[in-house]
Amino acid sequence: MFADMHYIRAVIFLFVLLSQVPPLFAQVKRTVSGAITDAETGETLIGASVRLIGPASANETSIAAVVSNSYGFYTVSAVEGTYTFVVSFIGYQTESRQLVLTRDIKVNIAIKDNNQLEEVVISATKRDENVSSPQMGLQKINVSEINSVPVLLGERDVLKTLQLLPGIKSAGEGNTGFYVRGGATDQNLILLDEAPVYNASHLLGFFSTFNSDAIKDVSVYKGGMPAQYGGRLASVLDIRMREGNRKEFTTEGGVGLIASRLKVEGPIVKDKGSFMISARRTYADAFLKLSSDSSINSNTLYFYDLNAKANYQLDENNAFYVSGYFGRDKLGIAETFGFNWGNGTVTLRWNHLFSQRLFSNTSIIYSNYNYVIKNMLDDNNFEISSAIKDFNLKQDFEYHPGGRHQLKFGVNAIHHTIDPGELTASQTSSVNPTTYESRKGLELAAYFSDEWNVSGQFNLVYGLRISSFSLLGPGNFKTYDTEGEVLAEQYYGSGKTVKSYLNLEPRLSMNYQLSASSAFKAAYTRNVQNIHLMSNSTATSPTDLYIMNSNNIRPETADQLATGFFKNFEDNKYEFSAEVYYKWMQHQIEYRSGTDLRGNQEVEADLLYGDGRAYGIELFFKKRFGRFNGWIGYTLSRTERRFDTIDEGSWFYAKQDRTHDVSVVGIFKVNARWTFSSVFVYNTGNAVTYPSGKYQVNGRTAFYYAEKNGYRTPAYHRLDVSATLEGKPGRKLHSSWSFGIYNLYNRHNAFAIDFKDDPVDLSRTQVVQTTLFGMIPSVTWNFKF
């Protein structure tokens, strides 16, 4: 039973819409299907454009177009006839051939990288996906862009590059967290080969967990989220790892000031299977050991990560994949303190082709994030450990009935286990051991969507995601009133349902092509989130706590409306888009004043629940080809929250609010060997709560705080530059040098601002600003053979 009439209206709307769909098999069509791969490596290509161009008829458009899916598979249908079959992908040679379509056929295409050819041919008839697709709020970046952008200490970083796109804002310097259209950092679903990554940071947030050497494809959905995704409110970051070279063995890597990396890939069975292994490690600890000071050389500070993947094509209808990520950070101070944290993921995948019209993917996924803190002082020794683990089973289908429809449907089940913490200590320690109760939850979902080509100009995607969440025993579970007082407490046995929630998440998006190179788009989505991050810090921390829905915590929900104009110029050489969005959020979580999450077993008693809203406009201009390329992104936005007990229920700026956010990226290829790039970023300062007065209590100063987030830190801006020198061509060992300067003009951006008494005049207050990074040079040597 649904109390919210909005859900019922959504279901009625979808049934009415479906009733208007023409019969799917009103006219017999033939189907062309297959896989798109890289001719040099055998890697499948995600998002390649596939088109059948033929003579127009009274009932059919002259172009039938699709893109390859997340597994490189495509299916396109048309009535019988003679067509030009065209495959194109950015950075690759366009492949075209004549095709006589009299029956369903399979065509696998391997396309060549532009660098393999003497000249680049770009199809003049290409209908660009960013214009023709009804999907909006989607940003894609390729690995070459990631590798070209200057970054801190020369470490290529997917998340830092994403934060240069409109609508995606950095949570702060020295922090891999990001905000998308007013959402919090935990409201982003980060997937690595379909496995969720709960903490995507290394070195306390200075670097992300994603090694660009191991990455093939990066997509982020800011709005119009497809029905197959769920569980988060703000965005989906879908990262796919490389599968490995099926043709030959290759090795590449790099040596930098802070880290080195190495990747090896090659065929298991030529043209049928391959593997990829990529490793990275920092070596700050190696330099610490060179010190003659024992208080320094006994310290530990490093991280490592390992990406691995293997695949095998059993036959033309079956392919198997296994991939994993394993990363760890370690921080130690002599023999007194130790802190380590990390992620582990494993994905098993089976692609199966039932027919040329029906494709399926079955995935079994495991994800684990945990941390351990050790205090090794004899009289006060202890160890704290915490973890969150997921087991996920997914079944996805794509069905192409042969008309104007492309259907996607599937189910998935996720079993969550949260171990909030276990405190152990020796018998001689003054610390009392404590074990916090684990929490278990079961998240189920089913979805359906249909991409309907209504006419040659109008495309519509409608869908529905049905999701449920159940909090499971064993354990004691409490119910609190609005003041945080216990109303009831009950024990539930293992597997017993404590509380359940059921939600409908309608999805709708459309585009209307004004011309072959311009389109108007609109989208509506509802998203639901059942796992919530608790953090006392302004930046993401390895010790942040996750909690589930409960008797007290309801699912967070967000509804988003978005519309936009998209335009390409000069055969996709230039791209422009303008998107406007409005998002309203319910059951947002905040803490009561003075709440401390450390060791807090009654954290639910200290939570407040309220509403949020976010709205803005995003402008994006990109030059794709030529010796000089890059992009300019600008976001004008407002993000607010409202809680009954904060500021008398008035709206206040959320910490995610940035009024202005500007990114300018330029990449200039001087010649075959030299490439220069630069990045300039500017954004409005953070919304923060500063003291508006102070008073004395027992000889100590206490500050008085009035308006929530009523002040701003100084504006943030920075200029980074880099230069890359490629080695001479034609050598077996290809190498390059990358030189960079982070924060070229040495801007002292505020990381934190604190207040304290003036030691000379206690009636006065000193303001102390902490800055993380000044100007930092870097150099990296990269190699491949």
Image (cartoon, grey):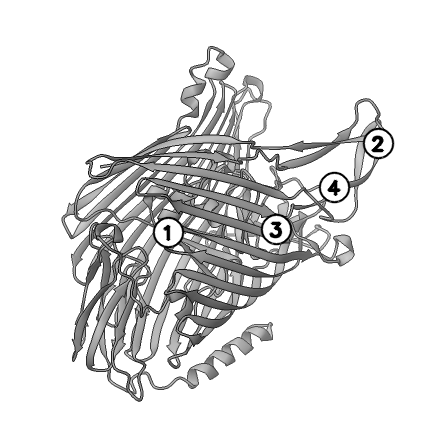
Q: Secondary structure at mark 1?
A: loop
Q: Earlier in the sequence, mark 4 or mark 3?
A: 3
The mark closer to the camera, 1 or 3, is: 1
User: 424 or 594: nearer the eye?
Assistant: 594
The residue carrying mark 2 is 697
Q: Are marks 1 and 3 in contact (CB under 8 Å)?
A: no
Res 328 quadrant in image: top left
Which mark, by number, is residue 690?
A: 4
The residue carrying mark 1 is 142
Quadrant of the image containing the C terminus: top left
Most extreme residue toward the front is 670
Q: What percent of the width, then of the height, locates residue 525? A: 51, 67
User: 527 or 482: nearer the eye?
Assistant: 527
**What kind of residue is marked 4?**
Tyr
Mark 2 surroundings within 10 Å by alpha-carbon count, few (fewer than 14), some (14 through 19), many (20 or more): few
The residue depicted at 48 percent of the width and 71 percent of the height is 521
Relative to 693, is 636 on the left or the right?
left
Q: Earlier in the sequence, mark 1 or mark 3?
A: 1
Mark 3 surroundings within 10 Å by alpha-carbon count, few (fewer than 14), some (14 through 19), many (20 or more): many
Res 580 quadrant in image: bottom right
The residue carrying mark 3 is 656
Q: What percent of the width, then of the height, locates residue 289? A: 43, 17
Q: Secondary structure at mark 3?
A: loop
Quadrant of the image containing the N terminus: bottom right
